[in-house]
Image: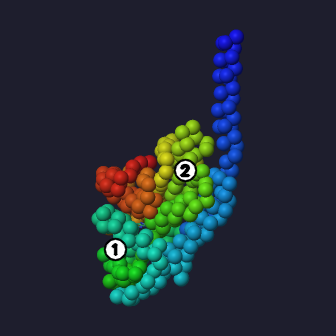
Amino acid sequence: MKKLRYLLMGLFVLLFVFGLWYGKTRQIKEYTKTEYLLDTSCSLTFYGKEAEAAANAVFDRIREIDDMMSLYKETSDVSRINGAAAGETVRVSGDTFKVIETALKICEESGGAFDITIAPVTQLWDFGGENPEVPNEEEIAKALNSVGYQNIVLGKNNTVTKLNGCTQIDLGGAAKGYAGDCAAEVAKKYNLTGGIIDLGGNIFCFGENPKSDDGRWKVGIQIPFSPAGTYDRVVTISEGAAVTSGTYQRYFEAGGEVYHHIIDPETGCPARQDYSSVTVVLNNSLEADCLATAAYVMGREKAEEIVQKFGGEIYFE
Ligand code: AMP
Ligand code: MG
């Protein structure tokens, strides 16, 4: 009789725990939305009652960042800096200033492997254009003349001054990362239980993953040049960024060669390495983005060193 009572009690506890767990997972509303912003496909998956409102607010914020940091929008902070003469003071938003400030730190730490003044060279290659072509050597040499992050000087009240009028900046290697940090900041105001922000290979995860046993997020690292979603390595993240810079993300082929969008500022040509992508895992998404691009150019040993210095992990594919 006693045994039966214990058995029934045990069964009751088990059912109660299962009921709690089932109720919790059923209650969590999942909402996914995708938009094309920052020159890439941006996808948000949020969990919580206010998931849809959160996604809309996050896309508004990303759009704002795109408007400030696009190389292609005439009124962006970036275009205003690029159009300025030597010595002219350009006042930018606090957001743009922060991105340039952090990016310049990584330009310096990477010894110029990461260089936001690469714009004249990236525009020459025109990877995003309809018919990109390999530029000739003279054109590349001319464009390289105005490359040098030391030409960008930051002042008080969010001001930027160029030492060389021909110098132009391209925040393509950093803005998506910053948008990841900002997206998470906005999303967290909506009482979500968790979420995953994917801005064209810049991933930011926060809160709890309702689909995993331990609540952590599993991010697969794309196998380069394989169909999207193919991976053999998975990194586990509680909260933070996983940012991939890869040659397969934007490239064209000419004369049997692959020309991709990550430029070595030493040569003005796509960086050549024995790997096709670098993934940096770090709590700060802006730093992770700059570091991933830098790491691609730097080669394995130096890349590992710099990422370690910033407290991150690095994976090569
Ligand atoms: P990501 O996708 O973050 O690796 O950034 C690649 C983008 O950053 C390119 O499409 C260019 O706009 C820009 N870029 C290319 N090479 C460099 C470089 N060496 N330093 C900084 N930005 C770069
Ligand atoms: Mg980057």
The crowding category of the residue bearing disc 2, from other C-alpha atoms within 10 Å (few below 14, some 14 to 19, many at least 20), is some
Looking at the rendered structure, the number of numbered marks drawn on it comes to 2
Please tell me which residue is depicted at 62% across the width and 66% down the height of the picture: 57
Please tell me which residue is depicted at 67% across the width and 62% down the height of the picture: 53
Residue 162 visible, this orientation = yes
Left or right for 9, reference 100: right
Residue 214, image quadrant: top right
Residue to which mark 1 is pinned: 149
Residue to which mark 2 is pinned: 207
The picture places residue 82, in percent across and down from the top left corner, at 44, 82
Please tell me which residue is depicted at 55% across the width and 75% down the height of the picture: 67
The picture places residue 316, in percent across and down from the top left corner, at 41, 49
Q: Is residue 106 above or below residue 75?
A: above
What's the residue type where badge 1 is placed? Tyr
Please tell me which residue is depicted at 35% across the width and 78% down the height of the picture: 154
The picture places residue 273, in percent across and down from the top left corner, at 38, 54
- Asked whether mark 1 and ligand 1 are closer than 8 Å, the reply comes as no
Identify the mark nearer the N-term, 2 or 1: 1
Mark 2–mark 1 CB contact (< 8 Å)? no
The picture places residue 194, in percent across and down from the top left corner, at 58, 51
Q: Secondary structure at mark 2?
A: strand
